[in-house]
Amino acid sequence: MSARLSQSLRRWSMGAALAGALAATLLFLPARWLAGPVASMTRSHVQLVNASGTLWNGRADVVLSGGEDSRTRASLPGGISWRLRPGLSPLASLSLTASCCTAEPLQLEFRLGWGLRELRWKAGSLRWPTELLAGLGTPWNTLGLEGRMDIETPGLSVALARGRLVVDGQVTVRAQDLSSRMATLRPLGSYQIDVRSGEDGGATEIGLSTLRGDLQIQGTGQWVGGRLRFRGEAWASPNREAALANLLNIIGRRQGSRSIINLG
């Protein structure tokens, strides 16, 4: 065997060994490595703790908090488990299961392109315990909401394209039989929030309406330039004003019997 051939074989063997070591390292990356990116992307409002398994197949407890240095927090019962698969297009596919909240795993896709970062949520649904919102801090911990939220979508895409937030699709949130510790009346009612992409790529549109109940709320808004702008009003059904007065004072600025809501 020539010296040149022997040297080539040694280089090939070293390259194969390095590739194998790299593949093994990637295969067994610990699940806890996700904790940092998730906290960073959500500004510490969502935290993964007690993570186990690998980056590709793992589980973790989920804590919602008011952000950095906040003492308010709430834990998702049962935590979450996931299966992450890399690819080219999409860059990664994520199957996410929460024992408390998903009948079927949520299917998410991540895509990267020139000046584009996109998250796609395929058609699906989940049921979210409203009490967990208190972990996010003000105003949720003050309102102390109880009830459930049914969230469903026929498909939703959220993309950051050349610095501009673009939403394509629709998601509907139904808050069922809500109650608040700020009101003696239980339940307050049930409500629906519709979020849908604007026409011709315009601003994302948001609508809030009352399905039933003594606390009436309605309003519309838009998500513009990464900020929410919402205008609405809330009022009590006849003979319920006294029971809901305290809550109406918190929801917005009082104007007679109505509470005016202005965000953004």
Image (cartoon, rainbow, N blue to C red):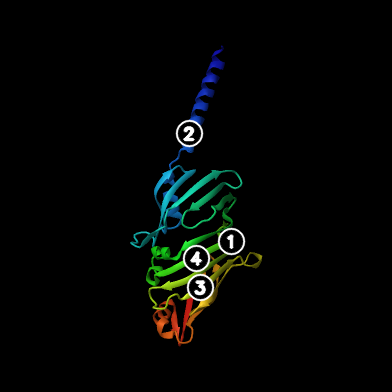
Q: Which residue is mark 1?
A: 153
Left/right placement of residue 109 relative to residue 236 reads right
Q: Secondary structure at mark 1?
A: strand
Amino acid type, mark 3: Ser
**Residue 24, label in figure:** 2
Q: Earlier in the sequence, mark 4 or mark 2?
A: 2
Q: CA distance from mark 1 to mark 2?
A: 37 Å
- Tag 3 and tag 4, C-beta contact below 8 Å: no
- Tag 1 and tag 3, C-beta contact below 8 Å: no
Q: Earlier in the sequence, mark 1 or mark 2?
A: 2
Determine the residue positioned at 48% across, 76% down. 262
**Residue 149, label in figure:** 4
Amino acid type, mark 4: Met
Task: Tell us which disc is closer to us: 1 or 2.
Answer: 1
Q: Earlier in the sequence, mark 3 or mark 4?
A: 4
Percent of width and height locating residue 109: 57, 51
Q: Secondary structure at mark 3?
A: strand
Q: Secondary structure at mark 2?
A: helix
Determine the residue positioned at 52% across, 64% down. 150
Task: Tell us which disc is closer to us: 3 or 2.
Answer: 3
Amino acid type, mark 2: Ala
220 and 208: which is toward the camera: 208
**Residue 245, label in figure:** none
Q: Which residue is mark 3?
A: 190
Q: Secondary structure at mark 4?
A: strand
Q: Earlier in the sequence, mark 1 or mark 3?
A: 1
